[in-house]
Amino acid sequence: MVKEYTVYMNMGASRPTRAPGHVQGTFGLEGFMDELANEIGMDPLELRNKNYSARNRGDTGVPYSSKGLDKCYEQGAEKIGWHRRNKTPGEGEGRIRRGIGMSSQIWWGAGVPGTLADVKIYRDGSVDVICGTQDIGCGTRTHMAVVAADTLGLDPEDITVELGNSDYPYAPSSGGSLTTPSVAPAVRDASLKAAAHLMEMAERKLKVPASDIVYKDKKYQDKNNPENSVSFKDVARDLRRETVFHGERKEMPEGYAYNTFAAHFAEVEVDTQTGHIKVLKVVAAHDSGQIINTKTARSQVIGGITQGVSASLFEQRIVDETTGTLVNPNMRDYKIATSMDIPEIVPLFVDVDDPRINILGTKGLGEPPRIPIAAAIGNAVYNAIGVHIREIPMTPDKVLEALKQKEVIR
Amino acid sequence: MKEFKLAQPQSLTQVTSLPSDRKYVLMAGGTDLLDEIKNGIINPDLVVDLKPIPDLADIKSANGRIQIGAMTRVSEVASNPEIKSSFPVLHEAALSLATPQLRNIGTVGGNLCQRPRCWYYRDPQVNCRKKGGSRCYATRGRNRYHAIFGGGICHIVYPSDLAPALISLSAEVVISTANGDKTIPLEEFYVLPRDNVQRENILEVNEILREIRIPLPKNGTKSTYLKFKERGTWDFALVSVAVNGVVSGKTFGDIKIVLGGVAPIPWRFKKAEELIKGKSVTEDMVMRATKEALTEARPLSENAYKQELAAVAISRAVLSLV
């Protein structure tokens, strides 16, 4: 049994960042899984696959609306070359040891029902998409434009995104990976209504039923008479005024657990004489449902891993126990990873269809890339040197100390 | 931050003749000095900018030696071809230091005269012994980056990368004073806390480090600088080592080993030199010698790992030269 405790400490205030509690708990739980696997002589991935469950075995017992973690395991393992790992932790030779480790992750990220968005179409054919959310790095401006453009058959640059104003339609605050799965379905809903309305207007203009109209290249066209066509702009001109279409992110069916999943695979090199860890490569396989925009999704994953590598190897609040003051409150002594410390990062998005979660089948991706990475690096170090460091950051002094303890145990 | 006046003297004489009761500091690159002022660690009335003084930023080859002006930027040392070929240890140390941006601004003189990075010293709330207080907070406090040699009453480490390299090369420094220049070995430039806890070097008021002189190497001389740091870049040494010696076959006829990041001054490690000099070098032998020499270390509660790093650093650096 792995238990996570919250303890009161006589220290300065702290603030949560990107999956508070989950990062720490996952480091403990997923590290323990590898210790267990080693104890019973089983491949850590096999241990996880054997205990795989499509139901939430925790408190509810209900099935997950979708769970692509098995695909994450499979595709991530293949991409990192899982077979290359040490079959027994620390079995390699020499002063530089290599290891491969992995960790799974579960998080929320279904989004919030009741989120609203508007699509506003003007008589000149220009389009606004409006939502009272903001973009704190979620790629919100991009996904709002992409979803509206995709639904209306326009290009993202044709869309003007309006956000960051509480007078705009309701959206929850950004946290818990809920922005995209809250806002994007609402934008989709509003855009679908707008598209349907424009199609009705095109029917009247072309004098043929919608079933005979093909919309392509920003043009409505009679499929039986291509000459009979009208552009998006000309249809919009027939609007009496600028017209607003309201969209909402709807409820999810009850009886399901809605979660995001991921598996991170890390390859590391450990200098057993200096205790220095170099992360060589990270493969991050994510189930975040339908990916709205691959470029921003990849950026989100790369950012999460960068933050996680930094926390795994360097970042710590160092407090003087006598005075209670933080001794490293600056960017020189509170060390953050530099570009020289960041490995090759390979984001993978597994193909998962989730028709229940929302009309786009999309899940969040804010916290997930940050959650499993420290555990994956810890397990890779374990695989390299044969001793599991149960604490982050894994600084050289701790690695050397752990190696000494290992010698004592032998 | 307290307001200060800025002086831009045109000659060294103007600097050495500043009224000695004036509370002033000398600014070379200023990369660290300005931080110290902004953080309230020092509160000078006058900052003396050395940049306008001519002829302080040259690298010259003369009289069987290389002369480096104190205001020469670290990046110029790193890219100088003669330094690279004659003094690999200095070239490598210059490249290992900080970041390209800081190397473009930071100067050699500033690097040699910089103040310590001890987090107690750098905390404006803490009045430690170095700032005239009565105790060293690192002794029983947080000390993973502190000294394992030469501490005693104050456990700072001297942060310079260039100093160990230059000492291993037997460099001398020229100091301008009100009574003319004096030249001393760089090794004698630094002072231990037990000699004067409030400063790190011998410079008196109205004295200024003007130039560094390095004798050209004898035939068969080899050198290298090895630095262990936590991050890939922009990090001070956990432990670093400069090794310079005359090698024939597998044996050092002469060797200098200077450690960085382990003591309040660049730490000339004579005991290790004695154990290695004149003997055929093998990995086993160097490891044994350095470990024996390291019994002199006096680690604190959180920095014993530096002994292991020092042994490995010396061993790897020495072996890389034979």
Image (spheres, helix red, strand yellow):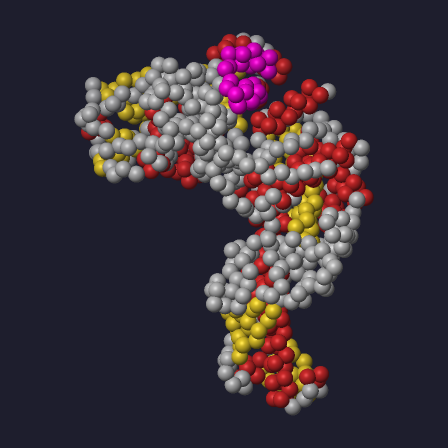
Q: Tell me the quarter of the image containing the C terminus of chain A.
A: top right
Q: Nearer the viewer, residue B142 or A300?
A: B142
Q: Magenta part mainly helix, strand or loop?
A: helix
Residue drawn at point x = 27 percent, y = 20 percent: B204
Question: Would you place residue A158 above or below residue B316 in this image?
Answer: below
Q: Residue A168 magenta-drawn?
A: no
Q: Is residue A27 left or right of residue A48?
A: left
Q: Is residue B70 left or right of residue A55?
A: left
Residue A235: quadrant of the picture: bottom right
Residue A178: quadrant of the picture: bottom right
- Which percent across, then down, holds residue A132? 51, 65
Residue drawn at point x = 63 percent, y = 79 percent: A196
Numbered-mark total: 0
Start and end of the magenta stretch?
A: B287-314
Q: Residue B311 magenta-drawn?
A: yes
Question: Would you place residue A76 above or below residue A203 in this image?
Answer: above
Q: Is residue B106 left or right of residue A176?
A: left
